[in-house]
C-alpha cells in the first residue's frame, strides 16, 4: 500500500526509532506547530519513510508512540506468539514495563509448552526447561542466571517491574524466537 500524505513539509532532520515498524529512521518530512508570538517549532509530527506512519514529538522531545524495543524477528508463524512479542515491544516503548514483563513471561510459557514442556510450571521452571533443552545458547547462561535471580516469583502479587527487567526479558525472548522461528526457516529456504 502506498500512502500519500498531503501538504507535508520539510522539517529539520530527526533520527528516531519508529514506534510502529521498529526501523531506525532519519526523517525530514512531516508537520509542525508553533506557539503564536514565540519563535521556533513547538511540536512536530514526522512521517516514517519505512512504514509511512506518523510519530509526534513534544517541545521536550518526548516521542509518541515511543520507540519499539528489541530486535525484529522474521517468520514467526504462530499468530499469538507474534502478537505477544510485538505487544511486549510496544509496551516497553510506552513505559509499560510491568506489562512488557508479563507479556514476555506468557511468551516464554507458550514457547516452552510448544517445545513439549508441561503446562502449569513456574516461570523459572520454564526458563530452566529452555536452557536444559538447549534453546538458550550456552554462552548466554550467565545472562539467563541473572534473569532468574532477579525475577519475582510471586506472580499473584502485583509487582512493578523495572525498565531493566523488561529489557532483559524482551532480549531473551527475541533470541529464542530467532532460534526457534527465524533461523530454521532461513536455513530451509537455502536448501536446494
Ligand atoms: Zn515506521
Image: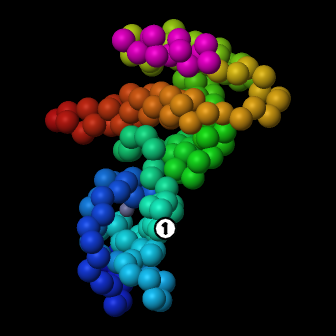
Indicate the position of residue 72 as horizontal and vertical percent values: 38, 44
Indicate the position of residue 123 as horizontal and vertical percent values: 67, 21
Judge the density around disc 1: few (<14), some (14-19), many (≥20) Cα neighbours within 10 Å.
Answer: some
Give the residue at x 44% y 61%.
Answer: 61
Residue lying farthest to the left in this orientation: 192
The residue range painted magenta reads 139-150
Q: Is residue 81 magenta?
A: no
> Image quadrant of ligand 1?
bottom left
Indicate the position of residue 100 as horizontal and vertical percent values: 60, 41
Q: Is residue 133 visible?
A: no
Q: Which residue is mark 1?
A: 58
- Image-quadrant location for residue 51: bottom left
**17 and 60: which one is in front?**
60
Give the residue at x 37% y 78%.
Answer: 40
Quadrant for the C terminus, please.
top left
- Image-quadrant location for residue 113: top right
Amino acid at each position: 500500500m502506498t500512502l500519500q500524505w498531503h501538504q507535508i513539509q520539510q522539517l529539520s532532520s530527526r533520527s528516531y526509532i519508529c514506534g510502529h515498524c521498529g526501523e531506525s529512521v532519519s526523517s525530514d518530512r512531516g508537520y509542525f506547530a508553533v506557539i503564536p508570538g514565540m519563535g521556533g517549532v513547538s511540536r512536530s509530527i514526522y512521517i516514517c519513510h519505512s512504514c509511512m506512519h506518523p510519530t509526534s514529538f513534544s517541545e521536550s522531545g518526548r516521542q509518541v508512540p515511543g520507540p519499539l524495543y528489541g530486535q525484529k524477528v522474521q517468520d514467526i508463524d504462530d499468530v499469538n506468539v507474534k502478537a505477544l512479542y510485538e505487544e511486549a515491544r510496544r509496551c516497553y516503548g510506552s513505559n509499560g514495563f510491568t506489562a512488557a514483563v508479563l507479556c514476555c513471561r506468557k511468551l516464554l510459557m507458550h514457547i516452552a509448552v510448544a517445545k513439549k514442556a508441561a503446562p502449569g510450571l513456574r516461570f523459572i521452571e520454564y526458563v530452566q526447561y529452555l536452557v536444559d533443552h538447549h534453546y538458550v545458547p550456552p554462552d548466554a547462561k550467565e545472562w539467563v542466571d541473572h534473569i532468574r535471580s532477579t525475577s519475582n516469583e510471586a506472580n499473584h502479587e502485583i509487582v512493578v517491574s523495572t525498565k531493566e527487567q523488561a529489557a532483559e526479558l524482551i532480549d531473551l525472548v527475541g533470541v529464542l524466537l530467532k532460534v526457534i522461528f527465524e533461523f530454521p526457516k532461513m536455513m530451509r529456504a537455502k536448501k536446494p
